[in-house]
Amino acid sequence: MEDIARDVSSLVPEEEEGNSTHNGNIWCLKRVGKDSGWLRLYENTEVTIGRGLNVTHQILSVSCPLMISRNHCMFKQIEHGQWTVTDNESLNGVWVNGTRISPGKPHTLQQGDVVRFGVPLDGIPVEFEYVLLQSSLDKVKDFLTKPAGAEAKALTSRPKRSKRKFGTDETEANNPPDSDSKLYRRSNTDKSHGLSCPTAALPDQAGPSEPSGRLSQCSDSSQHLTTLKRYNENLKALKERMGATQKRAAELEKQGGSSLEEMEALQEQMKLLQGELNSQQELARRRLEILERSVCEEERRSGMERNRQKEDGLKRQLEEALNEHRKVIEELKHEREGFQEVLQAKDKELEVTKEEKERARAQKEEVVTQMTEVLENELQCIICSELFIEAVTLSCAHSFCKHCIADWRDGEMSARSLVLDNCIDRMVENLSTVMRERRTALVRQRKGLHNAPSAGLVVIQDDCDSDPSIQPSNAEKATC
């Protein structure tokens, strides 16, 4: 496709180039391995390169039409005559000396740097590889590629002519018998008739299914490529024929004595060839535009398909996330119900424990109350009305505090009851703090007043009736 575009642009008259150039040194991108297709870098302007129609130099890949983006990159000259290249976020990138440059950032170039557009495919070297150099215009003029806008400008500057299709009989009548253009024109006309297929009806012929539509798009693109190749062959043949005719006319002018009829025939033939060349160029340009539109449409459809697939993937991911979220919510609900059951069971256990503690406390208080009543009723000295302190028992089975009975008897022998003392001490340990302190203070007071010489059991022989010195109280009498 690149060769087709280059050949089409090379057939444009070279009048414009002489108006804007001089014989000094120019900057250009030399095509590696080829003597054509060199790209000139115009000073004080931005030079754009791509496969679109609104670029300075249009390059089209034959092996992969989408290898070059519509506006692939831009070259711009800065101060001190240096050039920079900027990757316009192309798909396959711009490579300088084997390293891909960052998109959107100008990269400064030096003379001799190797610039590549695109990447190699299946071991095939890169199709568009150039070397930056500076040389005189006369040396590289024949190798330069016309800018993409030159052809359109040339076509618009020419006066419009009515299109005329040359048939086989008409071309035979207009050409001289000894001219070999008749054979070429017949074959060219046959090719033109064979290629004039309706392009607008192609979308309607696509099947209802998407795969068949893609196949029709591929066949449409391949058909356009085949047509462009044939137009290229036709344009080359026309160019050769015009060159031969111009040489023949120049020879006749040099001879001077040639017949006027032959000169008129050559001029008429040149007019016909020029008209046919213009028509072929116009057809080639239209085919290129159709191919560009088909490629853009295919890119748009592929982009829509990718977006649709991406949306479907996002929807599936969202559905999976929602399902997972629902499962997590259900699991949390079950766990919450389990926790609630455990909490209810714990609450019941706590209530039971509280009830048991209340019952135990009530029982303890009841025991303490009963013990206090026993201490107050059964273990009190009838003399001092206090709990026994060093209790002693008389022969009459009455018990008194040792101090009390000693004071009562004034020196009579008495005996302690250790069993009662120990029982009283154990009971006092379970009493309240106030009662224990009162008991301790009373014991200390009694021990301070009277210190017993012996801890043994003293039995006092007493006869309540015979000894008039001892008069028991009313409570003791009641006990006896």
Image (spheres, rainbow, N blue to C red):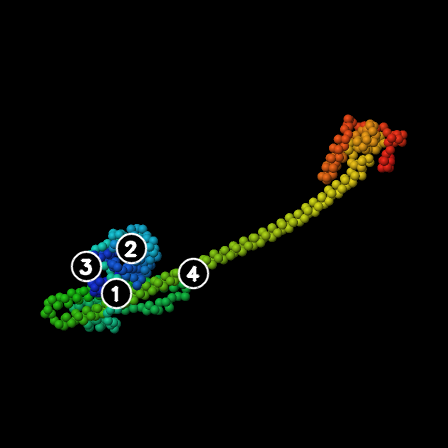
Residue carrying label 4: 308
Residue carrying label 1: 151
Q: Which of marks 1 and 3 is in front?
A: 3
Q: Position of residue 163 (x, y in %)?
A: 25, 72
Q: Which of marks 2 and 1 is in front?
A: 2
Residue carrying label 3: 23
Q: In this rendering, does residue 127 appear at all?
A: no
Q: Where is residue 92 in the image (x, y as percent from the top left)?
A: 33, 55
Residue projecting furthest to the front: 449
Q: Which amino acid does label 4 sit on?
A: Arg
Q: Which of marks 1 and 4 is in front?
A: 1
Q: What residue type is labelled 2?
A: Thr
Secondary structure beneath label 2 = strand
- At x 71% / y 44%, what residue is drawn? 361
Residue carrying label 2: 84
Which quadrant of the rendered structure holds the N terminus? bottom left
Q: How crowded is mark 1: few (under 14 residues within 10 Å), some or many (20 or more)?
A: many
- At x 28% / y 59%, what residue is drawn? 46
**Disc 2/disc 1 C-alpha distance (Å):** 27 Å
- At x 87% / y 36%, what residue is drawn? 477
Q: Where is residue 204 in the image (x, y as percent from the top left)?
A: 37, 68
Left or right: residue 251 compared with residue 128: left
Specify which label sits upstream in the sequence, 1 or 4: 1
Q: Count up the numbered dots.
A: 4
Residue projecting furthest to the right: 466
Left or right: residue 369 compared with residue 157: right
Specify which label sits upstream in the sequence, 4 or 2: 2
